[in-house]
Amino acid sequence: MLWSIISTAFTVYSFALIVYILMSWFPGARQSAFGEILGRICEPYLDVFRRFIPPLGMIDLSPIVGIIVLRLAESGLYTIYAMIF
């Protein structure tokens, strides 16, 4: 039960990141109310990776690394959860 809630939270946040990334392809999408809410949720997490990974021209790789790290964290937490319970 507990793990399903944690896993769902990771999945929802991953989808929020993906939607936020895709919104950058549409002019004005991030300035909408929904885009600003997603920005407040996603930007603090993505800023951590942007400090270490500079953009390559117009391509920002930090969201890809952020999603990979999020998935690795979920996997690590599952391993810890499985050892405890």
Image (cartoon, helix red, strand yellow):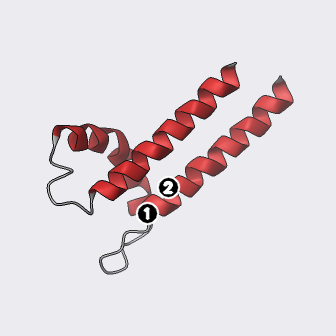
Quarter of the image with the C terminus in it: top right
Residue located 16% across and 43% down the image: 32
- In the rendered image, which quarter is residue 58 located in? bottom left
Instruction: Report how many numbered discs are placed on residues in the image.
Output: 2
Name the outermost residue toward the front.
26
The image quarter containing residue 62 is: bottom left
Q: Are marks 1 and 2 in contact (CB under 8 Å)?
A: yes
Which quadrant: the N terminus? top right
Q: Amino acid at mark 1?
A: Ser
As drawn, 76 above or below 85: below
Determine crowd level at label 2: few under 14, some 14-19, many 20+ residues with C-alpha closer than 10 A: some
Residue 8 - label: none
Q: Secondary structure at mark 1?
A: helix
Q: Which residue is found at the position 52% from the left and 61% from the top?
A: 65
Most foreground residue, 35 or 82: 35
| CA distance for labels 1 and 2 | 6 Å
Relative to 6, 48 lies left or right: left
Q: Secondary structure at mark 2?
A: helix
**Residue that badge 1 annotates:** 62
Q: Position of residue 38 (x, y in %)?
A: 30, 41
Give the left or right position of residue 27, taking residue 77 as reference. left
Residue 52: where, in percent of width, then height?
44, 65
Q: Which disc number belongs to residue 66?
A: 2
Q: Amino acid under label 2? A: Gly
In the current view of this chain or complex, which residue is farthest to the top? 1
Q: Say few, some or many: other residues with alpha carbon within 10 Å of mark 1 (under 14 / 14 to 19 / 20 or more).
A: many
